[in-house]
Image: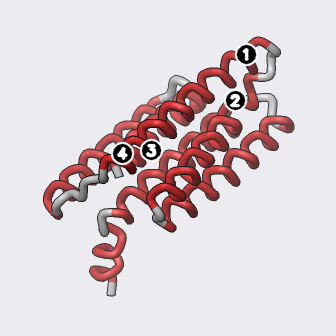
Amino acid sequence: MIVECLAGVAWLTVGTLGLGADGAGTLLLAGGIALVVFIFVENRRRGSHAFDPHRSADLMRYGAIAIVAIIAESVLLGLISEAGFGPGIAAVITGVAFLALSRSTGQRPTQWLGIALIVLGVLGALMSTQETSSFVSQGILGLLCGLLLLVSAADRIGLLETLRDRVR
């Protein structure tokens, strides 16, 4: 849940940077951070669940590998003047990290989250071949990945189920 929130805020930051310097991006990022704070408070209120040491070590290893891979691909794509593919490939790397984590933890929602991030990353990379601006490839992709990660975190602690019960 914490990993999803941190990755969600990172992707929202990527998305707001892609939107440009207008106030809408800042407002979306602030809303995302407020949602993360709300998720943390609800998680604390409902009683957080700790990882066992083996899963925690896997989490740290997959996270470190993903961060190093994203930095490396950003540098390499920048060197060959193909930085437009960066956000899409970074989303694929993030998705692969969540898939690997799902194998370690045995959690099916984490597997679906990884698959969704990979699909969004591939679509973002394909769209960057057609677009000349970074609005779609970085802005929209970053916001969608961030929103997907935050919704997954909210679902993990039961917020979506609570909202569904209130609607009924």
For marks 2 and 4, give the CA distance.
Answer: 28 Å
- Of residue 39 and residue 99, the one placed in the foreground of this image is 99
Badge 1 or badge 3: first in the primary sequence: 3
Neighbours of disc 3 within 10 Å: few (<14), some (14-19), many (20+) = some
Badge 3 or badge 2: first in the primary sequence: 3
Looking at the image, is 22 positioned above or below residue 63? Answer: above
Quadrant including the C terminus: bottom left
2 or 4: mark nearer the eye: 4
Q: Which residue is mark 4?
A: 56
Contact (Cβ within 8 Å) of mark 3 with mark 4: yes
Badge 4 or badge 1: first in the primary sequence: 4
Q: Give the side of residue 70 with respect to residue 25, left or right.
A: right
Inspect this view and state whether residue 106 appears. Answer: yes
For marks 1 and 2, give the CA distance.
Answer: 8 Å
Contact (Cβ within 8 Å) of mark 1 with mark 2: yes
- Of residue 60 and residue 34, the one placed in the foreground of this image is 60
Q: Give the side of residue 168 with respect to residue 125, left or right.
A: left
> Quadrant location of residue 26?
top left
Q: Which residue is mark 2?
A: 86
**Residue at horizontal 50 percent and vertical 59 percent from the top:** 110
Q: Which mark is residue 63?
A: none
**Residue at horizontal 28 percent and vertical 74 percent from the top:** 162
Mark 3: which secondary structure?
helix
**Residue at horizontal 73 percent and vertical 18 percent from the top:** 76
Q: Which mark is residue 78?
A: 1
For marks 3 and 2, give the CA distance.
Answer: 25 Å
Whole-percent x, y for residue 16 in the image: 51, 33
Looking at the image, is 127 positioned above or below residue 68? Answer: below
Q: Which mark is residue 58?
A: 3
Mark 1: which secondary structure?
helix
In this view, the residue farthest toward the bottom is 168
